[in-house]
Image (cartoon, coloured by chain):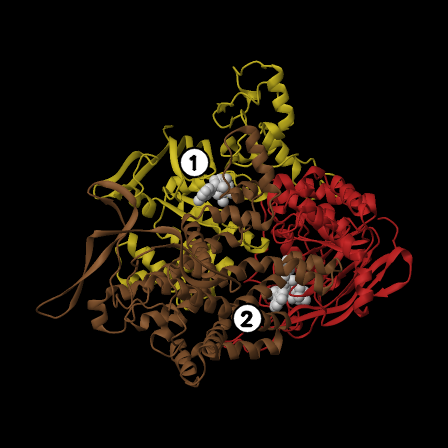
Chain colours: A brown, B yellow, C red
């Protein structure tokens, strides 16, 4: 409540320009800054969150442009290269710099174990090229084209190896990113919608309605999540087409995620109702509508965004877990969890460790979301004292 | 150090280096407390009262650090062969040293504005008082319990025996404050630092606590450093008063002297600005204009000059006033009382700077 | 004493009960009687001070009077400019919103009372906008006018509240209250959260504004010196009831209720030679969920008799303009904070 510490205290995270006039300008900029500017300034100072944002942006680009970024169609089989290990990109040969290239592949049968082993054939240099013609696709589902960001004109390139049918794992992971993220987004959307409505009703009306809703939420939350998911997912008819399964799984994941959000919305609404500025608006004669949209919504929007970003990893992990144990998405739909089904046994771990590559993406996505969530949480209330 | 002072702080400086600049929380504090004296520190929020108190106990929260100055403390603890006095500079001690811990536990005790924060919520109040007693006195558990009940009675917790086993949250604000005083007394300190102990309380409870502290202070003969922003409370409890503004003590004198013959313009203005029963009813108050500057932008020269009614352009805004002793008991930090203050430097730049800030 | 002025506000037997969240399962056993049947009036142009310890129901009183929360029972009647009487508590929604331009509130917490996501201009303009009193550029003119009156820098209107210190925020809150030219303003501890040197500025501003615009204040505070400074009359609350109401001059010299006496004896005097002799009150203020029977004050009262434990004392006028709720109000000789000489 210090008036002296007031301004400076909350300037806490705001860097001051060194020069006097600059300082004044900076101050005025700070004083006239809106909520989202303040949040952004504060967020920017959170390095991990920035890195997380960058990674997420990358994922977003991947999800949108998967066809273009992937060198191959995800179902394109390379019969010459089943369970092929990743090919390394090289820049040097005999100490001289080259444009990036991969080597050709030769196969050798191990005389003892009869295992086929794969060797780089250093006599064949296959240069990587940009904007090569490859498998045909429709960009954004509309424009037919066959240009890929990179690829090779002869031979093949499998940066993350290939699976049992010789499909390019790298391409498949890019396509899986799209599906897995979209499940997260849609699931979150459902959860958000339910959370906002149910939490809003609970918090705004209070009383008996509130009580009933809260008990119901407690009941749902007391059921362990994974078994519940499994039970619901297992009850999906086996004969459903993959697309329908996709939507059903999204729905299940979303339906179970709303409780947390509903609680937060309710809590925030209840505490906002007590804020003096809401009382002031009421006394001034503002309508309920104005109070909700002008005073309450803007101030909990930022909290909701934080919660969304924190819930996201659970959605993704939920999908991955369900698909991995075979209860979620099924081929030919490609998601991170579906890809990981190929890596379910010890043999796979030992012989084809690259099949685990999707795990790296899952970890990266979850971490990125957690970092962003962290940064947002710190920044969400730029007015905290 | 003065021959009989218990504590003497000279030119203490504490700063908090933060991202956006360095906060000079304490910018040259001078203070002296005699044994058995109650020294009140008054000042508005953010002026550095709490940080000054924290420096004594070396419990300044990070990233705060002592940049300079001395905190001389007369440490006198009963040892095996009689009384054993020596003067230590608390500012130079390692906060984690054996010596500092001993002083903190046995010679200087502290009570806070919000007692809840200094009690553990999961242990009973009684057990926490007992723990403090066992730390300082060689007693059996049973004896310590009895002693704890005794202390609870002493600080006026009704039904002390029964309330021993209550948890802090079962105590009201006033009762918690009493219990904290009991903990502080258990080590029989020679100096009690009380940081706004009554600010969070209602007047009737405040009166009880002040009454209690006055009684205990006399009974135990300890010195008290009493921090508050309420001038009335100071008038009621303090022998001597130090007035703080923006990290500096601007005036120190006996309580009657300072309330009746204030010397520093800030003290004078402050005394005029408070409503007084039976004197100011219905009248305008003489307000101090302007607001307290941000600690990141300390004014040059005298920190009070932008708001001061007696500001001398060209002096106050350029020259940092020195700590001047008017006599043995009254010291002040203002150019008006500085025997060899610089003559006004009336270069247009200085005058303009002064007027825009004001 | 000035001659009686017309009443602007009359509060009749006002009550506000909350369901108490008690017990292990929050099963709402019992009610908190935040205010329990209070009646008083406020004259046009005067300041009625309202004092009491925290939890005694001061804020609730202010809010119920302005219908920021709905009363459980009772009436709030307004009579503006000597016109007809409006039963504020009975106004239907539309009429209520229309009437609100006449009454405003200034809050204790300069931080929570301003929406941090709106510019100062929008904050001050809000009552004007929602009441439809001004349109377009009139709004900006009027906002600038009050902002200037409240000594705000009008170049700062584009800024957000986070740019301001506590004292300046309080000025913004005052500007918001004054922008619609209200008749009646509830000031809920407007200076409690401010530093001493800033308090005087705000008190001066409030008193000047009252003079200038002929405002009527309900001035809530727990600092008795502040209340004495601003009020014409003072009401003392204890556990949801008004125990004494009297002109300021009478109350501080000759209180009629033992609680008022105790409260006054606890004011720390600025004169060190007038050592306070607090009537140490036994114990602390009981919970309003479970107030004592009879006179709420009896467990802490130095003058309590048998009757106090069983019978609620009537709140009535003992001396001209001096109301009290104590069985012995006309017998006790109590000490005020001030002595007449
Ligand atoms: N932990 C801290 N971190 C940063 N600044 C601090 C901290 N503690 C205090 N300060 C700063 O030091 C100054 C003095 O604070 P404090 O001693 O708490 O004031 P007071 O107790 O007089 O109200 C203030 O400007 C405050 O912002
Ligand atoms: N919304 C509420 N719900 C339940 N109890 C409340 C509510 N508001 C106030 N009270 C209770 O009513 C009593 C009076 O509160 P309040 O009017 O805020 O007192 P004051 O302003 O005098 O400190 C307190 O005991 C408080 O706990
Ligand atoms: S009625 Fe009785 S208990 Fe209440 S204040 Fe008067 S004397 Fe005290
Ligand atoms: Mg402090
Ligand atoms: Mg209140």
Subunit of mark 1? B
Residue nearer the viewer, B57 or C190:
C190
Q: Are marks 2 and 1 on the same chain?
A: no
Residue B317 falls in which quadrant of the image? top right
Whether residue B284 can be seen here:
yes
Query: Label 2 CB, ligand 2: below 8 Å?
Result: no
User: As displayed, is residue A209 above or below residue B338?
Assistant: below
**Which residue shows up at 80% across the image and 57% down it?**
C131
Q: Position of residue C89 (x, y in %)?
A: 79, 68
User: Badge 1: how crowded within 10 Å, few (<14), some, or many (20+)?
Assistant: many
- Residue indicated by mark 2: A195
Give SS at disc 2. helix
Q: Which mark is residue B15?
A: 1
Q: Is residue B8 left or right of residue C105?
A: left
User: As displayed, is residue C297 above or below residue C202?
Assistant: below
Q: Nearer the viewer, mark 2 or mark 1?
A: 2
- Which residue reaches farthest front? A154
């Amino acid at each position: 409540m210090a008036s002296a510490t007031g301004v400076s205290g909350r300037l806490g995270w705001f860097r001051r320009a060194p020069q006097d006039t600059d300082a004044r300008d900076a101050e005025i900029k700070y004083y006239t800054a809106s909520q989202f500017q303040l949040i952004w300034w504060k967020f920017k100072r959170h390095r991990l969150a920035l890195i997380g944002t960058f990674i997420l942006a990358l994922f977003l680009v991947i999800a949108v442009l998967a066809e273009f970024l992937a060198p191959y169609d995800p179902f394109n089989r390379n019969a010459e290269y089943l369970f092929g290990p990743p090919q390394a990109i090289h820049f040097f040969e005999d100490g001289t710099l080259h444009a990036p290239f991969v080597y050709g592949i030769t196969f050798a049968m191990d005389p003892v174990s009869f295992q086929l082993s794969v060797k780089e054939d250093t006599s064949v240099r296959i240069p990587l090229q940009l904007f090569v013609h490859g498998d045909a696709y429709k960009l954004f589902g509309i424009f037919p084209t066959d240009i890929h960001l990179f690829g090779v004109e002869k031979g093949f390139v499998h940066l993350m190896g290939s699976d049992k049918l010789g499909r390019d794992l790298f391409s498949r992971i890019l396509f899986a990113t799209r599906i897995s993220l979209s499940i997260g987004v849609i699931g979150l959307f459902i959860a958000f919608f339910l959370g906002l409505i149910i939490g809003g009703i609970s918090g705004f009306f209070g009383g008996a309605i509130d009580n009933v809703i809260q008990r119901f939420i407690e009941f749902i939350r007391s059921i362990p999540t994974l078994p519940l998911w499994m039970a619901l997912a297992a009850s999906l008819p086996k004969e459903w087409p993959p697309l329908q399964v996709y939507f059903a799984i999204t729905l299940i994941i979303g339906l179970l995620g709303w409780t947390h959000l509903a609680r937060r919305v309710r809590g925030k609404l209840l505490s906002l109702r007590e804020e003096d500025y809401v009382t002031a608006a009421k006394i001034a004669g503002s309508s309920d509508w104005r109070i909700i949209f002008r005073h309450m919504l803007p101030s909990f929007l930022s909290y909701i965004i934080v919660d969304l970003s924190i819930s996201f990893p659970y959605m993704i992990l939920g999908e991955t877990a369900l698909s991995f144990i075979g209860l979620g998405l099924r081929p030919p739909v490609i998601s991170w969890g579906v890809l990981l089904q190929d890596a379910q046994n010890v043999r796979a771990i030992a012989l084809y460790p690259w099949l685990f590559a999707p795990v790296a993406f899952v970890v990266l996505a979850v971490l990125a979301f957690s970092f962003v969530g962290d940064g947002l949480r710190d920044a969400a209330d730029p007015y905290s004292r | 150090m003065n021959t009989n002072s218990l504590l003497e702080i000279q030119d203490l400086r504490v700063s908090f280096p933060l991202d956006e600049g360095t906060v000079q929380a304490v910018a040259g504090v001078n203070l002296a407390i005699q044994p058995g004296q109650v020294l009140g520190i008054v000042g508005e929020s953010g002026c550095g009262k709490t940080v000054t108190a924290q420096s004594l106990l070396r419990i300044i929260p990070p990233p705060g650090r002592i940049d300079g100055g001395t905190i001389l403390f007369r440490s006198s603890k009963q040892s095996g062969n009689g009384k054993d006095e020596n003067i230590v500079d608390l500012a130079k001690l390692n906060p984690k040293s054996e010596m500092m811990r001993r002083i903190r536990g046995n010679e200087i005790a502290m009570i806070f504005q919000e007692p809840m924060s200094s009690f553990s919520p999961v242990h009973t109040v009684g057990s926490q008082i007992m723990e403090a007693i066992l730390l300082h006195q060689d007693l059996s558990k049973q004896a310590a319990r009895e002693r704890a009940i005794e202390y609870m009675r002493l600080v006026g917790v009704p039904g002390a025996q029964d309330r021993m086993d209550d948890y802090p949250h079962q105590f009201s604000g006033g009762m918690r404050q009493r219990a904290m005083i009991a903990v502080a007394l258990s080590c029989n300190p020679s100096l009690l630092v009380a940081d706004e102990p009554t600010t969070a309380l209602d007047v009737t409870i405040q009166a009880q606590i002040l009454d209690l502290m006055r009684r205990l202070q006399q009974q135990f003969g300890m010195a008290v450093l009493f921090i508050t922003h309420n001038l009335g409370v100071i008038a009621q409890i303090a022998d001597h008063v130090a007035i703080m503004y923006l990290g500096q003590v601007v005036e120190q004198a006996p309580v009657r002297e300072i309330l009746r013959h204030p010397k520093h313009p800030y003290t004078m203005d402050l005394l005029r600005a408070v409503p007084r029963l039976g004197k100011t009813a219905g009248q305008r108050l003489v307000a101090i204009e302007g607001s307290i500057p941000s600690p990141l932008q300390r004014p040059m020269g005298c920190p009070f000059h932008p708001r001061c009614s007696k500001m001398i352009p060209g002096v106050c805004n350029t020259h940092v006033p020195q700590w001047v002793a008017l006599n043995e008991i009254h010291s002040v930090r203002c150019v008006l009382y500085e025997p060899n203050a610089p003559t006004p430097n009336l270069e247009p730049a200085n005058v303009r700077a002064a007027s825009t800030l004001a | 004493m000035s001659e009686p002025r017309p009443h602007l506000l009359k509060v009749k037997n006002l009550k506000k009960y909350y369901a108490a969240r008690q017990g292990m399962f929050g099963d709402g056993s019992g009610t908190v009687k935040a205010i329990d049947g209070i009646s008083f009036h406020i004259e046009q142009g005067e300041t009625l001070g309202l004092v009491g310890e925290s939890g005694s129901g001061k804020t609730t009183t202010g809010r119920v009077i302005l219908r920021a929360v709905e009363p459980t029972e009772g009436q709030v009647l307004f009579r503006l400019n000597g016109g007809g009487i409006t039963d504020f508590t009975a106004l239907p929604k539309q009429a209520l919103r229309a009437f609100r331009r006449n009454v405003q509130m200034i809050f204790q917490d300069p931080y929570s009372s301003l929406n941090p996501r709106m510019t100062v201009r929008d904050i001050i303009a809000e009552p004007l906008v929602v009441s439809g009193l001004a349109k377009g550029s009139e709004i900006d003119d009027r906002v600038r006018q009050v902002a200037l009156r409240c000594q705000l820098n009008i170049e700062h209107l584009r800024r957000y509240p986070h740019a301001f210190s506590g004292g300046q925020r309080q000025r913004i809150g005052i500007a918001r209250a004054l922008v619609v030219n209200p008749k009646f303003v509830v000031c809920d501890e407007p200076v409690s959260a401010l530093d001493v040197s800033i308090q005087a500025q705000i008190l001066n501003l409030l008193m000047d504004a009252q003079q200038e615009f002929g405002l009527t204040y309900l001035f809530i505070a727990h600092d008795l010196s502040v209340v004495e400074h601003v009020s014409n009359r003072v009401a003392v609350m204890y556990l949801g009831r008004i125990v004494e109401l009297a002109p300021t001059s009478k109350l501080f010299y000759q209180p009629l209720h033992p609680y008022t006496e105790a409260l006054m004896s606890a004011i720390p005097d600025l004169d060190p030679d007038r050592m306070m002799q607090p009537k140490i009150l036994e114990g602390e203020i009981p919970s309003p969920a479970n107030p004592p029977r009879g006179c709420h004050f009896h467990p802490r009262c130095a003058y309590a008799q048998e009757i106090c434990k069983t019978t609620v004392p009537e709140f009535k006028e003992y001396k001209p303009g001096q109301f009290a709720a104590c069985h012995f109000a006309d017998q006790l000789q109590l000490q005020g904070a001030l002595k007449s000489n």
